[in-house]
Image (cartoon, rainbow, N blue to C red):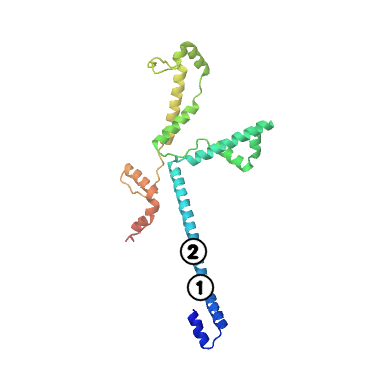
Amino acid sequence: MAAAVSALSSLGVPEADVGSEEEEEEEEAAEPGPAAAAAEQRREERLRRFRELHMKRYEACKLNSQEVLEEDKRLKLPPNWEAKKARLEWELQVQEKKKECAARGEDYERVKLLEISAEDAERWERKKKKKNPDLGFSDYAAAQLRQYQRLTRQIKPDLEQYERLKEQHGDALYPTSDSLLHGTHVPSKEGVDRMVADLEKQIEKREKYSRRRPYNDDADIDYINERNAKFNQKAERFYGKYTAEIKQNLERGTAV
């Protein structure tokens, strides 16, 4: 450095000017330029965006894990869990309302009726009137169940006879695993008459259901016997709307 200064001084350059130029060069080297500042800013922006993406990825993984656990819990629950849960919540609300009404000295049933709209009341009345609606024949098990329910609704218990039997037999009236009841019960004449009357009523009703359908003379004859006619009727009932066009083409002779 000293040699350079002496060389410049020998050329006639003052020492103060040489020192100021060196300081300016050092300041320019220390201060970054506009391009370097822009590059640093872009780098910081990229790092910030990278950190944000990393946080979003972490949040997505966390939410996905929570959702997987919740789905696993739902799959382990019974199939009608949602309905049971809603039912339990409704029962809790009813209990709370009953407690509130009891605390105020009001009748819960009256308060509940005041909160029901006219449309809901009419709909519930219509549902009450539609007890045991006839949905038609589905299978023999359903028909047997409907007949059993109908017969049990018609049963009118004889409480006087029940009291007499209870006094007569005592605890033996209620059978256990050691009881032997076969051949010990003798039905009364009134009971036999009721059973006969009910069976005759069932036979009469069955005859009405199995009545012969009237014969239509104008209908097309597409059968060879009665059994084949019934089969054709069933086929027409189930598949007639799909084969109507084919049948018309065959009758006109234009079938392809």
Could you say where residue 6 lies in the image, as x and y percent from the top left?
50, 83
What's under tag 2, amino acid-wise?
A: Leu
Crowdedness of circle 1 by 10 Å Cα count: few (<14), some, many (20+)? few
Residue 244: image quadrant is: bottom left
Residue labelled with disc 2? 47
* Above or below for 89 versus 71: above
| Quarter in which the C terminus is drawn | bottom left
Query: Residue at left 56%, top 80%?
Result: 20
Q: Identify the mark at residue 164; answer none if there is no mark.
A: none
In the rendered structure, the answer to whether residue 212 lies left or right of residue 46 reads: left
Query: Residue at left 50%, top 40%?
Result: 83
* Above or below for 94 versus 173: below
In the rendered structure, the answer to whether residue 221 lies left or right of residue 35 reads: left
Query: Residue at left 45%, top 43%?
Result: 73
Could you say where residue 248 lies in the image, as x and y percent from the top left?
37, 57
Residue labelled with disc 1? 36
Residue nearer the viewer, 108 or 26: 26
Label 2 and label 1: CA atoms lie apart by 17 Å
Q: Earlier in the sequence, mark 2 or mark 1?
A: 1
What's under tag 1, amino acid-wise?
A: Ala
Residue nearer the viewer, 230 or 77: 77
Crowdedness of circle 2 by 10 Å Cα count: few (<14), some, many (20+)? few
Give the secondary structure at mark 2. helix
In the rendered structure, the answer to whether residue 152 lies left or right of residue 255 reads: right
